[in-house]
Image (cartoon, rainbow, N blue to C red):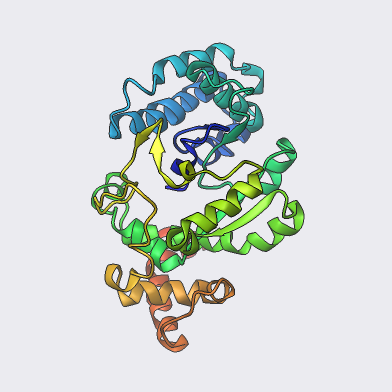
Amino acid sequence: MFLNLFDHNEHCCVFPTDIAVLYGYFPVYTAGDFTTAQRLDRLDRVIFGVSLSRLRDKHKLGDRLPVERIREHFFAHLNQDALTRIDAIIRQIIDSYRAVMALPVEQAPIVVIKETSLEIYAQMLAEMFPRAKFIQVVRDPRDNYAALYAGIEKHYRLFDENENHILASLLHRVGLGMRLIEPNMQALGSDHFMMLSFEELAQNPDDSMNKVAAFLGIPFTTDLLRPSILGQPTSGNNYDDQQFFAVTARNVGRWRERISDREAQVIEFHLGDIMEQFGYSRTFPRDVSARAAAEFYRWSNYRYFFKDSFAVM
Protein backbone atom coordinates (compact mmCIF):
# COMPACT_ATOMS: atom_id res chain seq x y z
CA MET A 1 0.00 0.00 0.00
CA PHE A 2 2.74 2.46 0.94
CA LEU A 3 4.59 1.89 -2.35
CA ASN A 4 1.37 2.40 -4.30
CA LEU A 5 0.83 5.84 -2.78
CA PHE A 6 3.72 7.21 -4.87
CA ASP A 7 2.40 5.88 -8.18
CA HIS A 8 0.54 9.06 -9.19
CA ASN A 9 3.27 11.47 -8.17
CA GLU A 10 4.82 13.27 -11.11
CA HIS A 11 8.27 13.37 -9.51
CA CYS A 12 8.52 9.61 -8.97
CA CYS A 13 9.50 6.63 -11.06
CA VAL A 14 7.91 3.81 -9.08
CA PHE A 15 8.98 0.23 -9.71
CA PRO A 16 5.54 -1.30 -9.15
CA THR A 17 6.43 -4.30 -6.97
CA ASP A 18 9.27 -5.76 -4.89
CA ILE A 19 12.52 -5.74 -6.84
CA ALA A 20 13.00 -9.13 -5.14
CA VAL A 21 16.76 -9.41 -5.77
CA LEU A 22 17.86 -8.64 -2.21
CA TYR A 23 16.42 -11.95 -1.04
CA GLY A 24 15.86 -13.86 -4.30
CA TYR A 25 19.36 -13.33 -5.73
CA PHE A 26 21.60 -11.65 -3.13
CA PRO A 27 23.67 -12.88 -1.33
CA VAL A 28 23.56 -16.52 -2.47
CA TYR A 29 24.00 -15.91 -6.19
CA THR A 30 26.51 -13.08 -5.82
CA ALA A 31 28.81 -15.03 -3.49
CA GLY A 32 28.22 -18.65 -4.44
CA ASP A 33 29.99 -20.73 -7.06
CA PHE A 34 27.54 -20.26 -9.92
CA THR A 35 28.06 -20.07 -13.66
CA THR A 36 27.07 -17.03 -15.68
CA ALA A 37 24.18 -19.02 -17.17
CA GLN A 38 22.91 -19.98 -13.72
CA ARG A 39 23.02 -16.39 -12.51
CA LEU A 40 21.23 -15.10 -15.60
CA ASP A 41 18.57 -17.79 -15.26
CA ARG A 42 18.05 -16.88 -11.60
CA LEU A 43 17.66 -13.18 -12.39
CA ASP A 44 15.19 -14.02 -15.14
CA ARG A 45 13.15 -16.20 -12.83
CA VAL A 46 13.12 -13.83 -9.85
CA ILE A 47 12.57 -10.47 -11.57
CA PHE A 48 10.49 -11.40 -14.57
CA GLY A 49 9.18 -14.92 -14.11
CA VAL A 50 7.89 -14.20 -10.61
CA SER A 51 7.92 -10.60 -9.44
CA LEU A 52 6.72 -8.59 -12.45
CA SER A 53 4.71 -11.36 -14.10
CA ARG A 54 2.71 -12.09 -10.95
CA LEU A 55 1.91 -8.40 -10.52
CA ARG A 56 0.81 -8.12 -14.16
CA ASP A 57 -1.42 -11.18 -13.95
CA LYS A 58 -2.90 -10.45 -10.53
CA HIS A 59 -3.91 -6.88 -11.39
CA LYS A 60 -4.62 -7.50 -15.10
CA LEU A 61 -1.95 -5.03 -16.20
CA GLY A 62 -1.14 -6.62 -19.55
CA ASP A 63 -1.53 -3.39 -21.50
CA ARG A 64 0.20 -1.25 -18.88
CA LEU A 65 3.13 -3.43 -17.86
CA PRO A 66 5.13 -4.78 -20.85
CA VAL A 67 7.12 -7.38 -18.93
CA GLU A 68 8.72 -8.96 -21.99
CA ARG A 69 9.99 -5.64 -23.32
CA ILE A 70 11.49 -4.75 -19.93
CA ARG A 71 13.05 -8.21 -19.79
CA GLU A 72 14.57 -7.88 -23.27
CA HIS A 73 16.03 -4.48 -22.45
CA PHE A 74 17.42 -5.74 -19.15
CA PHE A 75 19.35 -8.66 -20.61
CA ALA A 76 20.45 -6.73 -23.67
CA HIS A 77 22.11 -4.05 -21.52
CA LEU A 78 23.15 -6.06 -18.46
CA ASN A 79 26.91 -6.18 -17.88
CA GLN A 80 27.56 -9.89 -17.49
CA ASP A 81 30.89 -9.14 -15.82
CA ALA A 82 28.97 -7.50 -12.95
CA LEU A 83 26.63 -10.33 -11.99
CA THR A 84 28.15 -10.48 -8.49
CA ARG A 85 27.50 -6.75 -7.92
CA ILE A 86 24.04 -6.19 -6.55
CA ASP A 87 24.30 -2.43 -7.12
CA ALA A 88 24.87 -2.97 -10.85
CA ILE A 89 21.87 -5.28 -11.04
CA ILE A 90 19.60 -2.85 -9.21
CA ARG A 91 20.70 -0.01 -11.49
CA GLN A 92 19.98 -2.10 -14.59
CA ILE A 93 16.53 -3.05 -13.31
CA ILE A 94 15.65 0.62 -12.91
CA ASP A 95 17.35 1.71 -16.15
CA SER A 96 15.41 -0.89 -18.13
CA TYR A 97 12.14 -0.01 -16.44
CA ARG A 98 12.71 3.71 -17.13
CA ALA A 99 13.58 3.09 -20.77
CA VAL A 100 10.59 0.91 -21.60
CA MET A 101 8.10 2.93 -19.56
CA ALA A 102 9.39 6.24 -20.99
CA LEU A 103 10.22 7.74 -17.59
CA PRO A 104 13.54 9.55 -18.07
CA VAL A 105 15.40 11.02 -15.11
CA GLU A 106 14.49 14.53 -16.20
CA GLN A 107 10.78 13.71 -16.02
CA ALA A 108 10.73 11.57 -12.86
CA PRO A 109 13.97 12.11 -10.92
CA ILE A 110 13.06 10.10 -7.80
CA VAL A 111 13.17 6.32 -8.02
CA VAL A 112 10.91 4.55 -5.51
CA ILE A 113 11.58 0.89 -4.83
CA LYS A 114 10.26 -1.56 -2.24
CA GLU A 115 12.09 -4.56 -0.90
CA THR A 116 11.58 -6.80 2.10
CA SER A 117 15.20 -6.48 3.27
CA LEU A 118 15.94 -2.81 2.65
CA GLU A 119 16.32 -1.86 6.31
CA ILE A 120 18.62 -4.83 6.92
CA TYR A 121 20.97 -3.79 4.13
CA ALA A 122 20.43 -0.03 4.46
CA GLN A 123 24.00 0.83 5.42
CA MET A 124 25.45 -1.34 2.63
CA LEU A 125 23.07 0.17 0.09
CA ALA A 126 23.82 3.70 1.28
CA GLU A 127 27.46 3.13 0.34
CA MET A 128 26.41 1.95 -3.12
CA PHE A 129 23.82 4.72 -3.57
CA PRO A 130 25.03 7.73 -1.53
CA ARG A 131 21.99 9.87 -2.35
CA ALA A 132 19.50 7.17 -1.36
CA LYS A 133 16.85 7.81 1.27
CA PHE A 134 15.26 5.02 3.29
CA ILE A 135 11.78 4.97 4.80
CA GLN A 136 11.08 2.11 7.18
CA VAL A 137 7.45 1.46 8.04
CA VAL A 138 7.01 0.03 11.55
CA ARG A 139 3.88 -1.88 12.54
CA ASP A 140 2.73 -3.70 15.65
CA PRO A 141 4.27 -7.16 15.05
CA ARG A 142 1.04 -8.83 16.20
CA ASP A 143 -0.95 -7.01 13.51
CA ASN A 144 1.87 -7.71 11.07
CA TYR A 145 1.65 -11.42 11.81
CA ALA A 146 -2.15 -11.29 11.55
CA ALA A 147 -1.86 -9.89 8.02
CA LEU A 148 0.51 -12.71 7.04
CA TYR A 149 -1.61 -15.33 8.81
CA ALA A 150 -4.54 -14.43 6.57
CA GLY A 151 -2.51 -15.63 3.59
CA ILE A 152 -1.67 -19.12 4.80
CA GLU A 153 -4.20 -20.99 2.65
CA LYS A 154 -4.02 -18.70 -0.39
CA HIS A 155 -0.27 -18.16 -0.53
CA TYR A 156 2.04 -19.80 1.98
CA ARG A 157 0.64 -23.33 1.62
CA LEU A 158 1.85 -23.18 -1.99
CA PHE A 159 5.40 -23.11 -0.59
CA ASP A 160 4.66 -25.86 1.96
CA GLU A 161 4.64 -23.33 4.81
CA ASN A 162 2.25 -23.10 7.74
CA GLU A 163 1.62 -20.66 10.60
CA ASN A 164 4.73 -21.84 12.45
CA HIS A 165 7.00 -21.03 9.50
CA ILE A 166 5.44 -17.57 9.21
CA LEU A 167 5.77 -16.91 12.93
CA ALA A 168 9.43 -17.99 12.98
CA SER A 169 10.19 -15.75 10.01
CA LEU A 170 8.45 -12.78 11.61
CA LEU A 171 10.34 -13.17 14.90
CA HIS A 172 13.64 -13.23 13.03
CA ARG A 173 13.12 -10.61 10.32
CA VAL A 174 10.73 -8.13 11.92
CA GLY A 175 12.60 -8.27 15.20
CA LEU A 176 15.88 -7.56 13.42
CA GLY A 177 14.29 -4.77 11.38
CA MET A 178 12.93 -3.00 14.45
CA ARG A 179 16.26 -3.29 16.29
CA LEU A 180 18.09 -1.82 13.30
CA ILE A 181 16.14 1.45 13.30
CA GLU A 182 18.29 3.20 15.90
CA PRO A 183 21.68 2.17 14.44
CA ASN A 184 20.49 2.96 10.91
CA MET A 185 19.37 6.40 12.03
CA GLN A 186 22.72 6.99 13.73
CA ALA A 187 24.70 5.81 10.71
CA LEU A 188 22.67 7.48 7.96
CA GLY A 189 21.22 10.54 9.72
CA SER A 190 17.75 12.01 9.58
CA ASP A 191 18.33 13.36 6.06
CA HIS A 192 18.63 9.80 4.71
CA PHE A 193 16.66 7.60 7.08
CA MET A 194 13.07 7.97 8.26
CA MET A 195 10.89 5.77 10.47
CA LEU A 196 7.18 5.85 9.69
CA SER A 197 4.51 4.37 11.94
CA PHE A 198 2.02 2.23 10.06
CA GLU A 199 -0.63 3.10 12.61
CA GLU A 200 -0.07 6.85 12.18
CA LEU A 201 -0.11 6.47 8.40
CA ALA A 202 -3.37 4.50 8.51
CA GLN A 203 -5.10 6.79 11.00
CA ASN A 204 -3.78 10.14 9.78
CA PRO A 205 -2.56 9.74 6.19
CA ASP A 206 -2.54 13.47 5.38
CA ASP A 207 -0.12 14.33 8.16
CA SER A 208 2.05 11.25 7.58
CA MET A 209 2.39 11.78 3.85
CA ASN A 210 3.14 15.47 4.40
CA LYS A 211 6.11 14.37 6.51
CA VAL A 212 7.15 11.85 3.87
CA ALA A 213 6.98 14.47 1.12
CA ALA A 214 9.11 16.86 3.18
CA PHE A 215 11.65 14.09 3.79
CA LEU A 216 11.87 13.38 0.05
CA GLY A 217 11.95 17.05 -0.90
CA ILE A 218 8.82 16.95 -3.05
CA PRO A 219 5.61 19.00 -2.69
CA PHE A 220 2.71 17.31 -0.96
CA THR A 221 -0.33 16.71 -3.16
CA THR A 222 -3.48 14.68 -2.60
CA ASP A 223 -2.17 12.21 -5.20
CA LEU A 224 0.00 10.85 -2.38
CA LEU A 225 -3.16 9.64 -0.63
CA ARG A 226 -4.51 7.50 -3.49
CA PRO A 227 -2.95 4.03 -3.95
CA SER A 228 -2.61 2.91 -7.55
CA ILE A 229 -0.47 0.70 -9.76
CA LEU A 230 0.60 2.22 -13.08
CA GLY A 231 -2.25 4.70 -12.79
CA GLN A 232 -4.85 2.01 -12.10
CA PRO A 233 -6.59 2.25 -8.70
CA THR A 234 -5.71 -0.73 -6.54
CA SER A 235 -7.90 -2.31 -3.89
CA GLY A 236 -4.98 -3.29 -1.68
CA ASN A 237 -2.64 -6.20 -1.13
CA ASN A 238 -4.30 -8.03 1.76
CA TYR A 239 -5.15 -11.72 1.93
CA ASP A 240 -8.64 -11.09 3.32
CA ASP A 241 -10.02 -10.04 -0.08
CA GLN A 242 -11.11 -6.74 1.42
CA GLN A 243 -11.38 -3.90 -1.08
CA PHE A 244 -9.40 -0.84 0.08
CA PHE A 245 -9.14 1.97 -2.48
CA ALA A 246 -7.75 4.42 0.07
CA VAL A 247 -5.55 4.36 3.14
CA THR A 248 -7.53 2.73 5.91
CA ALA A 249 -7.11 1.94 9.60
CA ARG A 250 -9.52 -0.99 9.46
CA ASN A 251 -6.98 -3.59 10.62
CA VAL A 252 -5.10 -1.48 13.16
CA GLY A 253 -5.17 -3.27 16.52
CA ARG A 254 -7.31 -6.16 15.27
CA TRP A 255 -4.75 -8.88 16.00
CA ARG A 256 -6.88 -10.14 18.92
CA GLU A 257 -9.60 -11.13 16.44
CA ARG A 258 -7.23 -12.56 13.84
CA ILE A 259 -4.61 -14.66 15.64
CA SER A 260 -4.52 -16.93 18.68
CA ASP A 261 -3.44 -15.88 22.17
CA ARG A 262 -0.59 -18.38 21.91
CA GLU A 263 0.82 -16.73 18.79
CA ALA A 264 0.56 -13.27 20.33
CA GLN A 265 2.27 -14.56 23.48
CA VAL A 266 5.21 -15.95 21.47
CA ILE A 267 5.59 -12.60 19.71
CA GLU A 268 5.43 -10.68 22.98
CA PHE A 269 7.99 -12.94 24.66
CA HIS A 270 10.56 -12.51 21.86
CA LEU A 271 9.82 -8.94 20.77
CA GLY A 272 8.11 -7.35 23.79
CA ASP A 273 11.10 -5.20 24.75
CA ILE A 274 11.54 -3.65 21.32
CA MET A 275 7.75 -3.41 20.83
CA GLU A 276 7.41 -1.26 23.93
CA GLN A 277 10.08 1.10 22.63
CA PHE A 278 7.70 1.89 19.77
CA GLY A 279 4.59 2.16 21.92
CA TYR A 280 3.15 -1.34 21.45
CA SER A 281 2.18 -2.50 24.93
CA ARG A 282 2.31 -6.13 25.98
CA THR A 283 -1.01 -7.78 26.81
CA PHE A 284 -0.02 -11.03 28.50
CA PRO A 285 1.95 -11.72 31.71
CA ARG A 286 5.59 -12.57 31.11
CA ASP A 287 5.34 -16.06 32.60
CA VAL A 288 2.39 -16.94 30.37
CA SER A 289 4.27 -15.74 27.29
CA ALA A 290 7.32 -17.74 28.39
CA ARG A 291 5.33 -20.96 28.39
CA ALA A 292 4.04 -20.28 24.90
CA ALA A 293 7.59 -19.48 23.73
CA ALA A 294 8.89 -22.74 25.19
CA GLU A 295 6.18 -24.68 23.37
CA PHE A 296 7.02 -22.92 20.10
CA TYR A 297 10.72 -23.68 20.65
CA ARG A 298 10.00 -27.41 20.41
CA TRP A 299 8.87 -26.93 16.83
CA SER A 300 11.34 -24.23 15.73
CA ASN A 301 14.41 -25.95 17.18
CA TYR A 302 13.58 -29.24 15.46
CA ARG A 303 12.67 -27.49 12.18
CA TYR A 304 15.70 -25.22 11.88
CA PHE A 305 18.48 -26.22 14.26
CA PHE A 306 18.24 -29.86 15.26
CA LYS A 307 20.89 -32.34 14.18
CA ASP A 308 21.61 -35.76 15.60
CA SER A 309 24.96 -35.13 17.26
CA PHE A 310 24.84 -38.57 18.90
CA ALA A 311 24.88 -40.31 15.53
CA VAL A 312 28.59 -39.49 15.06
CA MET A 313 29.70 -40.37 18.59
Residue 259 picture location, percent across and down: 30, 69
- The answer to whether 214 appears left or right of 147 in the picture is right
Whether residue 16 is visible, yes or no, is yes
Residue 307 visible in rendering: no
**Residue 106 image point, x, y percent:** 64, 22
**146 relative to 137 in the view: left or right:** left
Q: Residue furthest top?
A: 76
Q: Residue at x 29, y 34 (%)?
A: 58
Question: Which residue is at the front of the view, 114 or 167?
Answer: 114
Residue 200, position as x, y percentages in the image: 49, 63
In this figure, what is the number of numbered marks? 0
In the rendered view, tell whether residue 308 sits above or below residue 53. Answer: below
Q: Residue at x 36, y 71 (%)?
A: 263
Quarter of the rendering containing residue 265: bottom left
- Asked which quadrant contains residue 50, the reply is top left
Q: Position of residue 114 (x, y in %)?
A: 52, 42
Residue at 41 percent across and 84 percent down: it is 284
Q: Is residue 282 left or right of residue 119?
A: left
Q: Nearer the viewer, residue 114 or 307?
A: 114
Q: Residue at x 33, y 62 (%)?
A: 250
